Amino acid sequence: MSENSATRITIRRPDDWHLHLRDGDMLRAVLPETSAHFARAIIMPNLVPPVIKTVDAIAYRDRITAAIPTGHDFTPLMTLYLTEGTDPDDVEAGFKAGVITALKLYPAGATTNSASGVRDFDKAMPVLERMAALGIPLCVHGEVTDPEIDIFDREAVFIERILAPLHQRLPELRVIMEHITTEDGIAFVQGSGGNVAASITTHHLIINRNAILVGGIHPHMYCLPVAKREKHRLALRKAATSGDERFFLGTDSAPHTNARKESACGCAGCFTATNTVQLLAHVFEQENALHRLEAFAVLNGPKFYRLPVNEATITLEKRDDAAVFPARIETAEGPVTVFDPGCPVYWHYA
Ligand code: NCD
Ligand code: ZN
């Protein structure tokens, strides 16, 4: 590993611990944007209909595998969408067969395609207990859906009402707070011992809520959980670059067509697969933490998931010319805008 002042770094090939690939034409268009950079990704199950049973995950995994471009080395790590009716035996069988890596908990109604999520957490206890016993990680979308709660407070209130009591009830359950956006999320992870971790997205390290709302509404900056105040972004940067092994990359790259984003009721999701790796080098350099990029993007994730670390490496170098990223990816459903960091980025693949 090179020094912080380095203009060239070699790290092992990264993984993405939270990714939306969708299906069909969209899957075929966006998957190469991930498989070009990442060795593995945790694949979110919020399709329509959601990926609920192991048999659904096998079929989805096979559709993903069929869409990997020749020459790309990529392994999808499949998740099941936890419902109140999820069968613990199916989860156990899927995990033991190596099909399932984790389950995903969406509070019902929290985000895109989450209507089948959990309303009554007591109903999910049998499967959560089985997961705790087997060491199966639970990926959590940590926002309450109570309409009384301000959208900017939904993560903090989720911790208070749902996550802290769940962790107390089942401390052996291995939980990943997905795409954390607040100081509160960081503090909860830091105070919860080794069974609670968090993924952090690229875009939440770069934007705060002003990027969505100042100078007009910027729909391509809107995602869930919504970006928060600047103090939270700074806290996320500190956690991501700290080397603390409980924090790792999950891009939450979530493609929606421009027509669905640039609308009177625009969808939530930022599409960052294309430029995430270079943007992370930029962020870590700004934080004088290039030597910790590998921990965040490569080492900490597999450590929590108890998976081997990638062997292949990538080399990035800083040049005088800014990297040129495509503004959009063309798909058969329409164009998908690539996340624009709003500043030049000088990191390139060597
Ligand atoms: C995701 C999507 O579009 O599926 N959107 C988002 O804003 N992150 C869902 C999610 O992860 O919340
Ligand atoms: Zn997501």
Image (cartoon, helix red, strand yellow):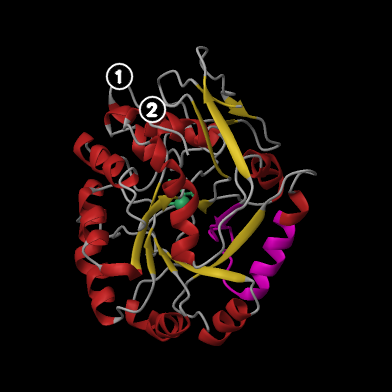
Q: Is residue 27 above or below residue 305?
A: above
Name the side, left or right, on which 230 lies relative to 196.
Answer: left
Please tell me how many numbered marks the rendered image carries: 2
Residue 304 coordinates in the image, percent (x, y): 44, 64
Disc 1: which residue: 215
Q: Quadrant of the C terminus?
A: top right
Name the side, left or right, on which 64 lies relative to 180.
Answer: right
Say which element carries label 2: loop
Residue 33 coordinates in the image, percent (x, y): 63, 38
Residue 326 visible from this viewpoint? yes
Q: Residue furthest right?
A: 70
Task: Name the kind of residue labelled 1 in the image.
Answer: Gly
Disc 1 residue crowd, few under 14, some 14–19, many 20+, Cα 10 Å: few
Q: Nearer the viewer, residue 103 or 245?
A: 245
Say if the magenta span includes residue 180. Answer: no
| Chain part drawn in magenta | 40-64
The answer to whether marks 1 and 2 mark residues whose Cβ atoms lie closer than 8 Å is yes
Q: Residue furthest top?
A: 320
Disc 2 residue crowd, few under 14, some 14–19, many 20+, Cα 10 Å: some
Disc 2: which residue: 218
Name the side, left or right, on which 94 lies relative to 108.
Answer: right
